[in-house]
Image (cartoon, rainbow, N blue to C red):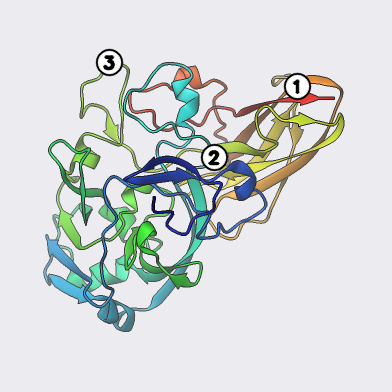
Amino acid sequence: MESWAKRDDMIVHETEPYNAETPGPALAGRTLTPVETFYARNHGPIPDIDPGDWRVELAGLLDRPLTLSLAQLRAGFAHREVIATVQCAGNRRAGLLAVRPIPGETPWGAGAISTARWTGVSLADVLAEAGPRHDAAHVEFTAPDVAADACPPEPFGGSIPLAKAVAGEVILAWAMNDRPLPPLHGGPVRVVVPGYIGARSVKWVTRITVRDRPSGNYFQAVRYRLAPAGADPGEGFPLGPVAINADILTPVDGAVLAAGPVSVSGYAFGGEHRGVARVDVSADEGRTWRQADLDPTPGPWSWRLWRIVLDLPAGAATVTARAWDTAACCQPEYAASLWNPGGYANNAWPRVRVDLR
């Protein structure tokens, strides 16, 4: 089995394609997630692309279509660094699976999320060189990996609104935490769309198409859509910006601990244009709350780690958390109210049960 230079304790859901999440304690206390710890989500085999052979074609509603090599990308545009959290749309799906079955979907826990320093060039600069036409409204990204779970199989892809694409923070990245972008995470070059679900940060991007409507790719038109129970494939709306979310990383669910002071830690992520305002923690099912300490934010597109020490007596306890964003939005209490047939966007209060002795 290919380990892709990952930690031995990664929670591997599938080996081919490789899909693995990070165990909670490995995420705790690290604003930047090491490459060997960063979660991996794939829909097909990992392409083997020589950086010297890589090209990206810009086509569609453009005055000046372009084809660029990695060398041209690096030499022709100002370099940009963005610290951004990438979160799978199915992060915390296990909480929805506990409500009702969701056939065929990966049972992600709370570790399908990670944060890195991405280095590349702003997509806005590249698009300015190509000249979007007046009728342009969306930007589609396409990768060379053929996804067998598409119907019929096709390369992975998706799109974002042009307004987001030219906002400045979206980049074509060739480095991750100051190291060349590894193939598993999209090397030689991937798109990074801060604040959006991970599926829009298309890896190994080889084609960028400017369109007047959203992508018709299977992973935009059918999958990664928020639909009601009983909906047919393709119903609902395509997922983009993520909502406020938080989870508890330590202690783990089911932990047996000494009664007394207990350190609790986790992450909170505000998503698109919304910062994390505060995180509350409860040890009595939400009857009373205490405010956790938040780490400083490294930038507007990053999660914030949090921590608190609770004094817990002997016996069973349930530790709960909830995050608020800067628009006064708070996580909903129960996953049952969020269930959907794709198992996406679970941002209900996390709960960890511990035994104090």
Instruction: Tell me how many marks there are.
Output: 3
Q: Which residue is mark 2?
A: 327
Q: Residue at x 87, y 24 (%)?
A: 313
Identify whether 201 is placed above or below 241: below
Q: Residue at x 59, y 36 (%)?
A: 247
Mark 2, other Cα within 10 Å: few <14 / some 14–19 / many ≥20: few
Q: Which residue is mark 1?
A: 317
Q: Residue at x 50, y 25 (%)?
A: 95
Amino acid type, callout 1? Ala
**Residue 210: % across, % down:** 17, 57
Q: Is residue 38 left or right of residue 103?
A: right
Viewer-nearest of discs 2 and 1: 1
The quadrant of the rendering that contains the C terminus is top right
Question: Which residue is farthest front?
Answer: 1
Give residue 183's mark.
Answer: none
Q: Secondary structure at mark 3?
A: loop
Q: Decide which of 272, 33 is in the foreground and name it.
A: 33
Q: Decide which of 345, 12 is in the foreground and name it.
A: 12
Identify whether 239 is placed above or below 199: above
Q: Quadrant of residue 119?
A: bottom left
Q: Is residue 301 visible?
A: no
**Residue 53: % across, % down:** 21, 75
Q: Which residue is mark 3?
A: 230
Identify whether 259 is placed above or below 267: above
Q: Quadrant of residue 100?
A: top left
Earlier along the polypeptide chain: callout 2 or callout 1? 1
